[in-house]
Amino acid sequence: MLRLPRLDVLMPATLDEAVLALQSPGSRLIAGGTDLLPNLKHRLESPTMLVSLAGVRELSTITVDDDAQELVIGAGATLTTVEQCPQVRAHAPSLCSAAGLVASPLIRNQATLGGNVNLDTRCRYVNQTDFWRSAIGGCIKSEGTVCHVVPGGKNCVAAMSSDCVPVLISLGASLQLVGPNGRRRVAMKDYYVADGTRHTTREDGEVTTAVIVPLVSTPRRAGYSKWTVRGSIDFPLTSVALCFDLERDEVAAPIAGATVVVGVLGAKPRVVTRLDEVVGKSLSDPETAAIVAERVHRQCKPLANVPYEAPYRRQMLRVHTRRAIEALVADG
Ligand SMILES: Cc1cc2nc3c(=O)[nH]c(=O)nc-3n(C[C@H](O)[C@H](O)[C@H](O)COP(=O)(O)OP(=O)(O)OC[C@H]3O[C@@H](n4cnc5c(N)ncnc54)[C@H](O)[C@@H]3O)c2cc1C
Ligand code: SF4
């Protein structure tokens, strides 16, 4: 059995108290704990105090701000709440799908959206016990100096494996953060960086307080595809989020804009480029799915950082992109 190290736990009741507590040396933020606690058991981090957000009620609300035309999802909302919330379903249905595909019902009841967007990167060589890692001498992200995924590589390329992040980037979402230096907002596409050891631009002591999704008045079709071997529990082996703005509210209408975001490559999700070719075509035109799937395949090269052979995952990415578009068309 893997045991947790000895730790103090602080339960602030307000955001201000949480931000203050996080300024103590050795403190670490915990929300649902479904990612952090396994990492602590694997001795991937060694904080001396956990600052829990469980008692900070102000972080759990989900509202529609009609003036700003935004859906504001508190970082403390659980993934079950996000999946089932009528307002999220109305304005960001692809986020409901992604939240509902995370892990298992029990984990989704505990896990928060704030934890999901701040999920640590994952790698088959590091998400192991310290005993296992000691057999290979650790790596850049743990106790060693080399990378086992890219031999000779100087940077960690562990994978961003959150289900919600690619979807939120495809919807143009941003994060609200509060820290010792005040409040700021950052577009999610700019929040992640390509360094698996520290993959976000979150400053020390900052708390994500909300995920903000802009509301759109134009017709849209958006979806998410995640490939795993088992039907539940597993992290994604490939993931792709798609968002198409349409000129009319039907799948046969011309596409006005397309955004496709791919996860589980490296530490930063990849926004696929050169999709202009599908603008003006319809979603229901089979050529659209073929073009998008080809762009994804050309631009995205999975690494051997998570299980299953990287070339096979690359093929699967193309297949699942095409199927995701076909599913959007079938849904009408
Ligand atoms: C068996 C298993 C399967 C899983 N499968 C999936 C999966 O398929 N897809 C997936 O996406 N995830 C998966 N996870 C990971 C995890 O359950 C989810 O990502 C979850 O949403 C994390 O949220 P949490 O509240 O539990 O985060 P925590 O574990 O509490 O925190 C995760 C990280 O985020 C930071 N953090 C938490 N809240 C905030 C905040 N408000 N502001 C700033 N930083 C914050 C913490 O400090 C920590 O670094 C799985 C986990 C397990 C154990
Ligand atoms: S990508 Fe390389 S450095 Fe990063 S966790 Fe994996 S083996 Fe370690």
Image (cartoon, grey):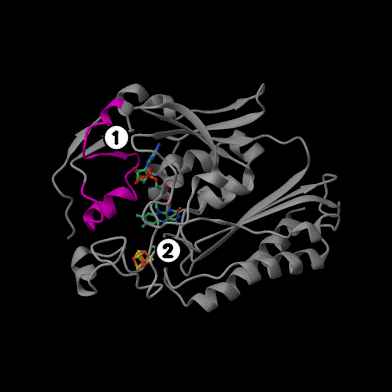
Residue 288: name its quadrant. bottom right
Q: Is 40 part of what is drawn in magenta?
A: yes
Q: In x, y percent, where is residue 120?
A: 38, 52
Which callout, 2 or 1, points to the residue nearer the camera? 2
Compare marks 2 and 1 and give the one earlier in the sequence: 1
Amino acid bearing label 1: Ser
Query: Height in image: 280 above or below 311?
Result: above
Residue 200 rendering spot, x and y as whole percentages: 44, 47
Task: Give left or right: position of 167 versus 246.
Answer: left
Magenta residues, as a range?
Answer: 20-46
- Residue that appears at 39% across and 27% down: 181
List the residue tagged with mark 1.
Answer: 52
Left or right of 292, for residue 72: left
Neighbour tally class for label 2: few under 14, some 14-19, many 20 plus, Cα within 10 Å: many
Of the four image quadrants, the one with ligand 2 is bottom left
Q: Which of 63 and 144 lies nearest the eye of the viewer? A: 144
Q: Amino acid at mark 2?
A: Val
Magenta span contains residue 99 = no
Which structural element holds mark 2? loop
Judging by the rendered image, the residue that carries numbered circle 2 is 157
Alpha carbon separation for disc pair 2 and 1: 29 Å
Observer able to see residue 226? no
Disc 2 within 8 angstroms of ligand 2 (CB): yes
Q: Is residue 80 visible?
A: yes
Q: Residue at x 28, y 54 (%)?
A: 39
The residue at 56%/38% (across/down) is 174
- The picture quadrant where one finds residue 308 is bottom left
Viewer-closest of 114 and 272 = 272
Q: What's the residue at 47%, 42% (across, down)?
A: 80
Q: Secondary structure at mark 1?
A: strand
